[in-house]
Amino acid sequence: MATNDALDVKAIRADFPIFDRQVHDKPLIFLDSAASSQKPLQVIEAMNSYYRCCNANVHRGVYTLSEQATDMYEGARKKVARFIGARSWREVIFTRNATESINLVAYSWARANLRPGDEIVNTEMEHHANIVPWQQVAKETGAILRHIPVSEEGLLQLDSLDTLLNERTRLVAFTHMSNVLGTIIPVKQIVEKAHAVGALCLVDAAQSVPHMPVDVQELGCDFLVFSSHKMCGPTGMGVLWGKRELLEDMPPFMTGGDMIRRVTLDSSEWNDLPHKFEAGTPAIAEAIGLGAAVDYLSALGMDKVRAHEKEIAAYALERLSEVRGLCVLGPPDAELHGGLAAFTMDNIHPHDLAAILDAEGIAVRAGHHCAMPLHHKYGVAATTRASFYIYTLKEEIDALVEALYKARQLMTRQVSL
């Protein structure tokens, strides 16, 4: 699937059955991987194999099928732990998605530890999943929510940390890569400043873990969250990684079966990590699918994944700059930019533009991308977003640009009529 120097993208595409289909009688060009990536056969077959060969509940049976299912489920957890550099598989909590992972920390750690006057620091470029939970926590605890501003170029104004961070700061929650601007954040720099005042750090890595090497020990953060479905895995599966000492002290998020060690009619004792945070029957097939996705990406090499996306992003930014009236949000430097480009184009509404592109077989996302405050800052209600992944070809960027020219001609003709 890969040479010594670069990804063999055409060989990779052969692993993804979705690319055999057409849309509106045209080959599918999928440029919405920031929302959800496509799935390789290796992931699909791993989940199919579980259902066909050893479908049973985990942790609860002593018969062969259950033991095999448990080995596959917990094996996936260990793969994830290695993939992100966790010290122990017990630090890896399976959730439904990155959103639930953030809410787990908000409900469990924040509500147990925050007091009136404590401060949470966020940024202006966050996804709603990393804004709304902290708004709710602030309302319930009396904590104060503050924000790191974003520059016109789409960079965090990190010099503001010197005034934002103080002895009242308890948590800094921020994205590793913006799902609108594509901006890659210097996590270690923020973590060091936060830890210097005694604050914890939560990193939303939903847009980074699928696209670049991420090592939680190297980053130094306290919590990190991401989703399976953005990294070639299935939907309905997310990950919360947290430092073990923090997770040990946190109360359960949900209660019920499998997260307990002992129950009487009057009291209960919690299970060990990670099971304390995984009440009820888990998403077994989805965890196995995530494990297969980790295997797939690991075989490619995350350094090569990042190198490919940086090359594609640089090419896309260059080609999009040729389109008159098109404005890309975010930094122009591909070194600071992930594999996506969100843009406006003249007075064409992003939904209209996305519909026109769809007629050409090109799938892009249009809207506020769950980042309304960021769009408001730039004075736009919505953008069109093209996002790239391991299977994106330069020819597809060329097709996107050609379709954008067609869209301008079509909309200009309609206005003149």
Image: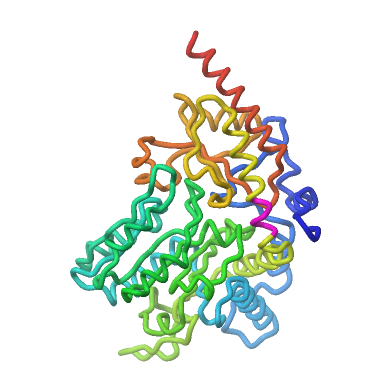
Looking at the picture, does residue 117 appear above or below residue 9? below
Q: Is residue 51 visible?
A: no
Looking at the picture, does residue 158 appear above or below residue 240? above
Looking at the picture, does residue 415 appear above or below residue 339? above
* Residue 164 x/y as whole percent: 28, 62
Quarter of the view holding residue 158: bottom left
* Residue 64 x/y as whole percent: 70, 84
Confirm whether the magenta stretch covers residue 305.
Answer: yes
Residues 225 and 324: in front is 324
Q: Is residue 42 visible?
A: yes
Count of numbered tags: 0
Q: Which residues are magenta?
A: 304-309
Confirm whether the magenta stretch covers residue 361.
Answer: no
* Residue 397 x/y as whole percent: 66, 37
Quarter of the view holding residue 105: bottom left
Colour pattern = rainbow
For image coordinates 57% across by 62% down, the residue present is: 209
Looking at the picture, does residue 295 appear above or below residue 230? below
For image coordinates 62% across by 44% down, the residue present is: 314
Residues 366 and 6: in front is 6
In the image, 373: left or right of 49? left
For image coordinates 51% across by 59% down, the residue present is: 206
**Which secondary structure dominates the residues rendered in magenta?**
helix
Q: Quadrant of the N terminus?
A: bottom right
Residues 300 and 334: in front is 334
* Residue 161 x/y as whole percent: 33, 61
Quarter of the view holding residue 142: bottom left
